[in-house]
Every structure is written in C-alpha cells, then in structure tokens.
Amino acid sequence: MDYIRGLSKTAFQEYGPYEDMLPDWFMAGITVTLLAVVEEHPLGFAMIRRLGRESRLHRVSELLAIAVEPAQRKRGIGDLLLNEIQKAAHRTGVETLVLHTAIENMPGRGLFKKHGFILLDTRSNFYPGGQDAMMMYKDIDTG
C-alpha cells in the first residue's frame, strides 16, 4: 500500500489526490492489482476493478491506474504490466477493459493505442485537477 501511495503521488499528482484514492481502493478489496518487481524492488503497478453487477456491465473492468517508476520508463515495464493485467482480467471473466487518460498524457495514449485501445469518448474536466480525459476501451481476446 505504501508503494502504491508513493508512486501514485509521483505519477498522478497533477491530476488529483490519487495517492489517497488508489490505496483506499486497494485496501477495500475491489481491485486486482499487479506489481512489477525485480529482485524484490517494485518498479510499477497496474490496477483494475469490475464496473458493476448489472448484466450489461458485469464483464467490463476499468483500468484505474498504470504507473512505472520514472527512472524505469521506456524499458517495457508498462507493456508488461498492461499485458499481464489484461490476462488477469480475462481470467476473471472480463471481456472489455475501459480506461481514462488525460488528453495531454502522450506517453499513456501511445501505450494504450499500441495495445489496441480505441477512443470511445472525451470528457471535459474529468480529473479533480480540471484536465480533460479520453475514455478508451478494448475488447479482450477470448481466443
């Protein structure tokens, strides 16, 4: 939890108080959270949650966050985390992942596009800091 809080503050501070929200969601048991770890040192994390129990949403999860330590970026860790979180989602019966990313988050947008996420909508003033967001989705291969 301390690691998630610390990296959340570093990675998302301009968007709002995610260093408080993400650990709360983690501790509430409503997420699947994966850590990228090398030699017992965490390098990043990804977190999803199921959207709802209604029949049309029960197979949809939201990627709440994906973050990599600044010094470890551009080394494939984000790719690894995104691949593994999709596998974890699929194992729990999820068919579609949705996410929000800030319009100005070019590295995040590039990562999501590379992994097949498609723009669904834009949302004005989505983040607590007032930034606009893109809502993206991807149907997970049930192969």
Image (spheres, rainbow, N blue to C red):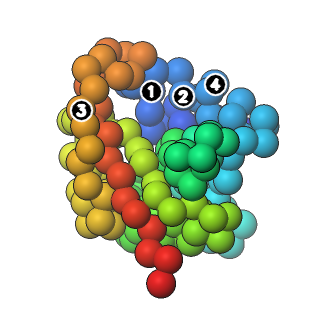
Q: Which of these two is toward me, 99 or 141?
A: 141
Task: Return the residue found at the far bottom.
Answer: 143
Comparing labels 3 and 2, the label whose residue is closer to the camera: 3
Q: Which residue is mark 2?
A: 18
The disc at residue 131 is none
**Measuring 40% from the left and 63% from the top, which residue is drawn there?**
139
| Viewer-nearest of discs 4 and 1 | 4
Residue displayed at 37% across by 16% down = 129
The numbered mark, 3 or 2, whose residue comes first in the sequence reads 2
Residue topped by disc 4: 20
Q: With 44 as the anchor, is 40 left or right in this view? A: right
Q: Name the residue at 36% across, 52% down.
A: 137
Q: Which residue is mark 3?
A: 122
Residue 131, position in %: x, y? 28, 22
Element class at badge 3 = strand
Q: Are marks 2 and 4 in contact (CB under 8 Å)?
A: yes
Checking the image for residue 13, the label placed there is 1
Q: Are marks 1 and 2 in contact (CB under 8 Å)?
A: yes
Crowd band around label 2 with a 10 angstrom C-alpha radius: few (<14), some (14–19), many (20+): many
